[in-house]
Image (cartoon, rainbow, N blue to C red):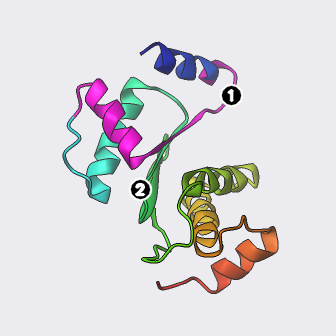
Amino acid sequence: MKALELITAFEKHFDVIFGLNEKESSELGKNLGLNTSDHSPEGLAELGRQILERVPVDTLVIHPTAYALAIGKSGAATVEGPFTLKPLITTGAGDHFNAGFCLGKLLGLDNALSLLTGVATSGFYVRTARSPSIGDLVEFLRNWPTA
């Protein structure tokens, strides 16, 4: 719990984005005594809201493989990702999601659009096994994959 105190302490100086994958959100929820049995988008959004009550930061992001959600002062946003059954690589997909989400925030986008840049960055990466350039990301968004 000391780590959570350290994370929330940064909120005094910055807008903190606390990002978790699905397993991390479940493990944290269990440690906080929360119900972690519902892994639907609605269930994870509720878990996220409860985590955010106990870890008061600006934004909490949870990113399973098929979608991502962000919860902040303005509410919750969920964006489905371009899930593929045949990824070329999966190691690093979460890091790419985080980079894409942060890119969106740095560009001044809201949580929903930042989630979109996150899932698109990760989606491009798992299909090509390389990080996207801005041009790659724009092209990927224009031709949003269906599989």
Q: CA distance from mark 2 to mark 1?
A: 26 Å
Q: Position of residue 96 (x, y in %)?
A: 63, 56
Q: Which residue is drawn at the image coordinates 79% and 68% (left, top)?
A: 133
Amino acid carrying mark 1 in the image: Phe
Read off the magenta span.
11-34
Q: Position of residue 141 (x, y in %)?
A: 64, 78
Q: Position of residue 45 (x, y in %)?
A: 34, 49
Amino acid carrying mark 2 in the image: Pro
Q: Are marks 2 and 1 in contact (CB under 8 Å)?
A: no
Q: Which residue is drawn at the image coordinates 48% and 85% (left, top)?
A: 146
> Dot 2 corresponds to which residue?
64
**Quadrant showing the N terminus:** top left
- Does residue 110 lie above or below 30 as drawn? below
- Does residue 47 lie above or below 132 as drawn? above
Dot 2 falls on a residue whose secondary structure is loop
Q: Which residue is drawn at the image coordinates 63% and 72% (left, top)?
A: 124
Q: Which residue is drawn at the image coordinates 65% and 69% (left, top)?
A: 129
Mark 2 or 1, closer to the camera: 2
- In the image, 58: left or right of 64? right
Q: Nearer the viewer, residue 63 or 59?
A: 63
Dot 1 falls on a residue whose secondary structure is loop
> Dot 1 corresponds to which residue?
14
Q: Which mark is residue 47?
A: none
Residue 17 magenta: yes
Residue 51 seen by the camera: yes
Q: Position of residue 100 (x, y in %)?
A: 66, 57
Q: Nearer the viewer, residue 92 or 45?
A: 92
Quarter location, residue 66: bottom left
- Neighbours of disc 1 within 10 Å: few (<14), some (14-19), many (20+): few
Quarter location, residue 28: top left
Q: Nearer the viewer, residue 123 or 4?
A: 123
Residue 2 magenta: no
